Amino acid sequence: MKVRTRIAPSPTGYMHVGTARTALFNYLFAKQNHGEFLLRIEDTDTERSKEEYETDIINGLKWLGLNWDGEIIRQSERLGLYKKYLVQLLNEKKAYYCPHIKEYIEKEKESQLENKQVLFHRCTERDSNLKVGEIIRFKNRALNSVSNEDSLIRTFQDNIRGQIEFFPKLLGDFSLAKNLDAPLYNFAVVIDDHETEITHVIRGEDHLPNTPKQILIQEALGFEQPEYAHLPLILAADRSKLSKRHGAVSVNEFTKLGYLPEAMNNFLALIGWHPKDEKEIFSLEELAKEFQLERVQKAGAIFNIEKLNSINNHYIKEMVPAEISKLIAPYLDMYNPTEAQLIKVAHLFKDRLNIFSEIKELAGFIFALPIYETKLLSWKEEPKEKIKENLQIVLSILENIPKNSFDIDATTTELMPKANEIGRGDLLWPLRVALSGIAKSPSPFEILDVLGKKESINRIKKTIEKLK
RNA sequence: GGCGCCAUCGUCUAGCCUGGUUAGGACGCAGGGUUUUCAACCCUGUAACACGGGUUCGAAUCCCGUUGGCGCUACCA
């Protein structure tokens, strides 16, 4: 049978990195088994679902290169299908209309909580077979009698976790739909996974408690049970489920910050999965080849942004300046840089860039010399006059280099003998600051090269002026 | 409260199934090197088997318990 997996996000928020990781694992598993990876939008909650979020999810998947097979499946467009099965369950008396409103159920819960009981609804109308309410509930057979075999412990297999136990009775008569035209999550999932012939349900661990309900629905409908695999959760630093309050969690935020999709995929793959050997850098194709569900971790993993940064830095270093220049351009927009400038900047900063958005802070001085204090010019507390004198020396040397051969080689060759003579720090430090206005920068020779002769001379002269 | 899941360096993890390792790697951090600073790169270092029993000649590894963490407990998904 052909392997089919799916990513089934609900468009109630921007695409979460957890969704991205689940999508990635589903994609990888499908690819390595020459199967299909489907995208299903779970938009049955009309109150919270928004088109904007759906678009964001689609863009996120595309950005990551996790291309799905076939058309997008939208649950909101399949209401007739759910209705058909709902009617079937109702007719077969495997589901019923429940008259109890929310307030009643909540009160019921409160008293159950007080009495330290399991929270579930057992309806007085479950056998009335009348349409006494809107909500449709699953008639849980395990509730029928205490000696019923359905009240015993049951298990299902999870490809990551092994055998999982559950008590059908403890599930109560859970809800299937708000009404005939408004299916609820657990029900819609079962119908869709069946109809689209999903063979492997790979999803977050937060769905583990839903699985028994879904299995019961499958059995009531006579559906085949797919294989399950529940992924560990992505956690925040405090080990709770990663959410908005923890900072950047949506894929589009990472895109805006200037992360590379290949770094994102690589990093996400390493949260909860690890190859046999010690390799850590993987392309999507390599991942599809080496990924194994059996090697997925069971415990939740903290989203470690430092690691992501280091992986991103790795991928940036592998790129050529021409590619990088395009990606840093948006962050330097306010300076109206030329293409040639961007390429030089890309070349100069590629090794020290974790994410592209950092370029503004790192390279801003190239385009606009920041204001700085005069004392920054002194290497080791030399007097003003000494600094000025050294800058004069540099200036006279640089002025003698022809404009069109004013590059790293030329400036290094001309300046270094003098620097060695009077002290490297004494000569090069003031030059660095005169050119950049900051303490932490690339070498003065590299800056000279990017700035060009005219701007370099200009900056040095201004500094000398400043020292008067 | 109930149910379920989980537990190796600060973090991500290898090792666990098929007991015998100086418990390995990466990120981070610290120190050193690299034609001045920063970054990158190279080298070195740092640091972990949650606890208690049991089985065994021998337990991170198998079993039981404890503790802790997380998730779910909707007319959300």
Image: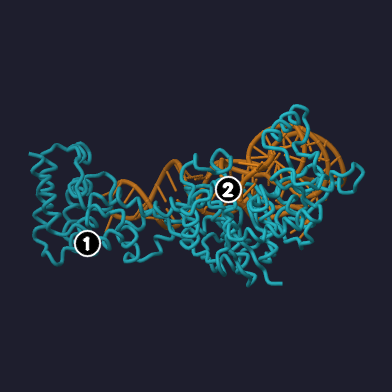
Chain colours: A cyan, B orange
Q: Nearer the viewer, residue A115 or B59?
A: A115
Q: Residues within 10 Å of mark 1 (few under 14, many from 20)?
A: few
- Mark 2 chain: A
Residue A100 visible in rendering: yes
Instruction: Tell me the distance, in whole angstroms, between the alpha carbons under discs 1 and 2.
Output: 42 Å
Marks 1/2 in contact by CB < 8 Å: the verdict is: no
Q: Amino acid at mark 2?
A: Ile
Q: Which quadrant of the structure image shows residue A287?
A: bottom right
- Whichever of callouts 1 and 2 sits on the residue coming sooner in the sequence is 2
Q: Amino acid at mark 1?
A: Thr
Q: Nearer the viewer, residue A69 or B62?
A: A69
Q: Which residue is mark 2?
A: A234
**Residue B45 image point, x, y percent:** 52, 45
Residue A432's tag is none
Q: Which residue is mark 1?
A: A338
Residue A278 visible in rendering: no
Q: Nearer the viewer, residue A229 or A221?
A: A221
- Mark 1 chain: A
Q: Residues within 10 Å of mark 2 (few under 14, many from 20)?
A: many
Report the residue that reaches farthest toward the top.
A114
In the image: residue A177, left or right of residue A392: right
**Residue A367 image point, x, y percent:** 21, 52
Q: Which quadrant does the C terminus of chain A fall into? A: top left
Query: Helix, strand, or loop for circle 2?
Result: strand
Which residue corresponds to the image point at 32% horizontal and 52% vertical from the top-left? A359
**Residue A232 image point, x, y percent:** 63, 50
Q: Which quadrant does the N terminus of chain A fall into? A: bottom right
In the image: residue A270, left or right of residue A112: left
**Residue A404 image point, x, y percent:** 14, 67
Q: Nearer the viewer, residue B12 or A383?
A: B12
